[in-house]
Image (cartoon, helix red, strand yellow):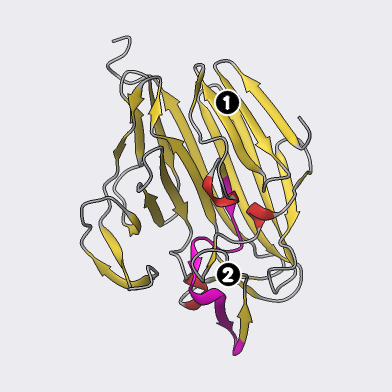
Amino acid sequence: MAGRVIRAVEGARLEIDLEAGCRLASLQVKGHELLVTAGPNPIDWGAYPMAPYAGRVRDGHFTFRGRGHHLPRTLGGHAIHGTAYLQAWHEDGDGTFVTPLGPAWPFPGWARQQIRLAPDGIALRLEVHSAEGAMPASCGWHPWFLRRVGGAAAMLDFRPGFMLERDRDGICTPRRRAPSAGPWDDCFGEVKGSPVVTWPGVLRLELESACPYWVVFDRREHALCVEPQTAPPDALNHDPFIVEPGRPLAAELNIRWSLPTSVGG
């Protein structure tokens, strides 16, 4: 298939769509598809890298070192999820992929993603690089897991210490509050342990990342999103990481799978 890289190991098969933002376009484990494999918009399917910013940017505008910058407003009047997921990528060595950040981002730079498939999981590393001078950035991943796999409904084990308040525009603010009951389209921090998605009797997924923030989106009947991020949405307007040449922003995510403990003893 043009533009797709296929990797397969015992019990797992992965498709990476380079033309669609170097996203995991399909992930089959033990014969079961785990990801939403198509959607009406680029933000609605697969598992894609978010760079050079993750989540929404209010009104598609931010100021960096006294200068205002405008981004394409792609969702409800706001910018969302960066530029890398809309770019075509190319392979730069086995399991390593690269793309420029593109004309929609006001600073020259590139993103680099490493993808390693093993029989028991996927190891991902994402980097945001500056080609010249300083620039703000955040990054992360946006996986769309299917609600139902092998006839089982997904269950999420997720234990956050706080959530960030959202304003009337649905944008995260820096204000912390106690987590409320879902459904969620919210950002959380101080998460205890690694989030786990389980399809009872079928498969268990553990998402391990040192990213300090996680966004959970569970307002769709067909899918569940659990998104590690280096910073909360709208970080470009608050406290972004400053990328400079030779000083990239990096994040890692390990997705590990196993049979539920109720299967096979």
Q: Which quadrant holds residue 263?
A: top left
Count residues near mark 1 (Cα–Cα under 10 Å), then give few for <14, some for 14-19, many for 20+. some
Q: Which residue is mark 2?
A: 73
Q: Earlier in the sequence, mark 2 or mark 1?
A: 2
Residue at the outermost bottom position: 66
Q: Which residue is mark 1?
A: 118
Count residues near mark 2 (Cα–Cα under 10 Å), then give few for <14, some for 14-19, many for 20+. some
Q: Which quadrant holds residue 9?
A: top right
The residue drawn where x is 56% and y is 74% is: 60
x and y, in percent, of residue 25 in the image: 61, 36
x and y, in percent, of residue 172 in the image: 38, 69
x and y, in percent, of residue 100 in the image: 75, 59
The residue drawn where x is 58% and y is 15% is: 10
The residue drawn where x is 47% and y is 56% is: 229
Q: Which amino acid type corresponds to the residue marked 2 in the rendered image? A: Arg
Q: Where does the C terminus fall, quadrant-wise?
A: top left
The magenta region covers: 48-67
Q: Which amino acid type corresponds to the residue marked 1 in the rendered image? A: Ala
